[in-house]
Image (tube, rainbow, N blue to C red):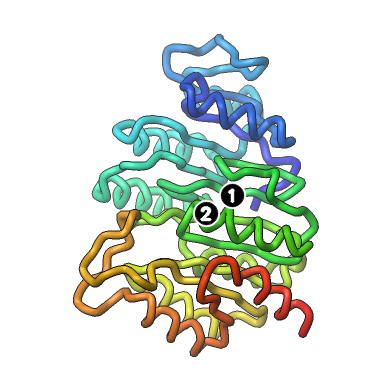
Amino acid sequence: MIDEQTRVVVQGLTGREGRFHALRNRAYGTKVVAGVTPGKGGDEVEGIPVFDTVAEAVEATGANASLIFVPARFAGDAVYEAGDAGISVIVCITEGIPAQDEARFVNYVQRTYPQTVLIGPNCPGLISPGKSNIGIMPGEITLPGGPVGLVSRSGTLTYQAVHELTQRGIGQTTCVGIGGDPVPGTGFIDCLARFEADSDTTAVVMIGEIGGSDEETAADFIASEMTKPVVAYVAGVTAPPGKKMGHAGAIVSGGKGTAAAKIEALEGAGCRVARNPSAIGDLMAEVLQRG
C-alpha cells in the first residue's frame, strides 16, 4: 500500500498538528513532498513547499498520497479534493466529523475512485516499518521486516499491540489504524484481503472493539478466505450494555455488538483471541513458532 517511493502531500501542513506530524513523518524517512493550505501557496514549512490546492501539489511534486489534518468542518472537502486530484492513498486523521458527512465522502470516493484507498477518518493512519509512515503512529516502537500485518479500530491499542510484537522480536509488514467511526473508508476485510495477498505477510493481528458487526463479518471472511493465521483482540469486554465507549462506532445495543459475541465469532473462524492486549505478542509468537 505504501513504501519508500510513496510521495505525501499534507493537507493542513501549516497548522500546528499538521506541521508536527509531517516533520515527524519526514524524519522517519517518509517522502513528504508538499503541503496544502488555501491562501498560503508559495510559502514553505522547513523546506516543504505549500500549495493552494492538492491538484497544484500533485502536478508540481508527483504526490500520490495525502495526509489530512484539517478541522472537521472542512475534512469532507479535503477528501473530495484529494480524490479529484488523483491521489491513490488518502489518510484522514481528523476526528469529530459528523457521520452524515462521513457517509457522503466515503461513498463518493468508493463510487467515483474505486482504486483509491481511504483510511479513516478519526484514525492514526498507517505505517510500513522502515519504509513509510503516514499518520500519527510512533515509528519508534515498530520493527521492520515482517512477518506480521496489523489492522485495528483502536489507535492506542494499535500502539500497544505493535509494542508487544516488537518486544518479542516480531516485526511488522504494515500496521493500519482504520478508525472507530461508524463509516470508515477502509474496513477489516479490505485490510485482511491485502494481507492475504501480500507475500511478505505470514500472519495477521486484528484488533476490534464492541459495537457494530464488523468483527463478525470479518470472522466470516477469515473462515472462508484467509489461509494465514489471525490473532485477534476485542476491546470492551467489561463495557455495560447500551453504552457508547469512546469511539462513535462502539455502541452496544439490543444485545448486539458485544465483546462476547465477537470473540465467539472469531474463535469459531479459527482465530486465536487474546483476553487482554498484553497477551497479543505471546499468542503471535506461538502461532509463528507452529508455522
Q: Which residue is mark 1?
A: 126
Residue type pointed to by label 2: Gly
Q: Secondary structure at mark 1?
A: strand
Q: Which of the two discs, 2 and 1, labels the residue nearer the N terminus?
A: 1
Q: Which residue is mark 2?
A: 177
Residue type pointed to by label 1: Leu
Above or below: residue 269 compared with residue 278? below
Q: Secondary structure at mark 2?
A: strand
- How far across and how far down the image is residue 16, in percent? 48, 22
Side (left or right) of 79 relative to 48: left
- How far across and how far down the image is residue 141, in percent? 68, 49
Specify whether residue 39 is in view: yes
Above or below: residue 64 compared with residue 214? above
Side (left or right) of 81 relative to 136: left
Instruction: Give the residue at x 54% y 79%.
Output: 273
Q: Nearer the viewer, residue 290 or 98?
A: 290
Marks 2 & 1, CB-CB < 8 Å contact = yes
Q: How busy is the neighbourhood of tag 2: few (under 14 within 10 Å), some, or many (20 plus)?
A: many
Instruction: Give the residue at x 24% y 64%.
Output: 243
Q: Nearer the viewer, residue 290 or 195?
A: 290
Picture quadrant of residue 164: bottom right
Residue 36 is labelled as: none
